[in-house]
Image (cartoon, rainbow, N blue to C red):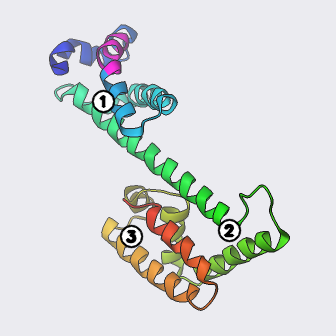
Amino acid sequence: MYKHTIDNATCIAFISGDKKAFESIYCAFSKSLYRRILYLIKNPDDADEILHNIFIKIWTGREHIDPDNNLYAYFMQAANSMAIDQLRKNLRTQVVHDNISLFGEGRTALSVEDSYIGKEDWKILESAIEQLPPQRRLIFKLCKIEGKSYKEVSESLSISPATISNQLVLAMKFLRQFVKQHHKEILLYCLLFDYIGRR
């Protein structure tokens, strides 16, 4: 029903930078978009921020909008994408926090031995990452550590998403083999990387 609420003239005015058209679109779409975002991420504060960012992002990039397309669908696609990105960010944060706590650094009563073991385990894993071939190492760091999507890395490095996926599979295989020769707990980091950066 929303595609009938915003007529083509309003859409064109929005693309041209008309602030009244922006307000009309905001009033027509914001409640529905907010409900969708909140349904996905279950956090009102995050939902408010994402809704705000959606309108800023689309407003600043409005010249790329095709006025003949369904504008509401365009906004909804942006809402879904940004909500999923936030979910991935929250997952990375939570898994890292749980992993650090498991190694002892998140405890209120931290022993010197626990802290040393956690840091040493990470050093071992870092040394394994540095042994990857240059391109594979770069792809791994971008996707698994920095959390970039396959699309972002593909565009940045001018390689296909399939190549990225293959390189990550090979990287994870090497890391698992490497850590088996060291501390068993380091395998938890490999599980962490399996969760992070999946696209």
Left or right of 133? Residue 78 is left
* Circles 1, 3 touching at the beta carbon (< 8 Å): no
The residue range painted magenta reads 22-31
- Distance CA(mark 1)–CA(mark 3): 29 Å
- Which marked residue is nearer to the observer: mark 2 or mark 3? 2
Residue 42 figure quarter: top left
* Residue neighbourhood size for the residue with mark 3, other residues' Cα within 10 Å, grouped as few (<14), some (14–19), many (≥20): many
Q: Residue 103 carries which label?
A: 2
Q: Is mark 3 on a helix, strand or loop?
A: helix
What number of labels is visible?
3
| Residue 164, label in figure | 3
Give 15 or 33, whichever is nearer the viewer: 33
Residue named by callout 1: 75
First of labels 2, 3 by sequence position: 2
Is residue 118 within the magenta segment?
no
Q: Where is residue 36 in the image (x, y as percent from the top left)?
A: 32, 31
| Residue 140's disc number | none
